[in-house]
Image (cartoon, rainbow, N blue to C red):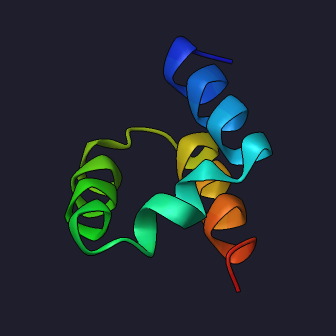
Amino acid sequence: MDLAALVLRRVAQRGELASVALNTHGTRAVQKLIETLSSREQRQIVVEALRGGE
């Protein structure tokens, strides 16, 4: 697991990514984050983290 995936997993576990995505300014930040993802593992972590915000 690369460093980016570790950081993403930590944020996802804390439920912070979904909270950021629901914020007016955070939405754009999450969009930019998604644009930078480089692996399937990273994308899966983000998907799982955002599902937590349902």
Q: Quick check: 24 above or below 37? A: below
Q: Is residue 38 above or below residue 34?
A: above
Residue at image x 65%, y 56%? 44
12 up-or-down from 8: above or below: below
User: What residue occupies the far bottom of the structure in this picture?
Assistant: 54
On screen, residue 17 versus residue 6, left or right, reads left
Quadrant hosting residue 54: bottom right
Q: 39 left or right of 7?
A: left
Q: Position of residue 39 (x, y in %)?
A: 49, 40
Q: Position of residue 10 (x, y in %)?
A: 70, 30
Taking the image as shown, residue 53 lies to the left or right of residue 3, namely right
Q: Residue 48 falls in which quadrant of the image?
A: bottom right
Q: Report how many numbered discs are placed on residues in the image.
A: 0
> Front-most of 40 and 47?
47
Q: In x, y percent, where is residue 41? A: 63, 42
Name the residue rendered at 56%, 42% in the picture: 42
Q: x, y percentage for residue 37?
A: 37, 43
In-image side of 21 versus 43 (left or right): left
Q: Nearer the viewer, residue 10 or 40?
A: 10
- Which picture quadrant has residue 50? bottom right
Q: Residue at x 56, y 48 (%)?
A: 40
Q: Quadrant of the N terminus?
A: top right
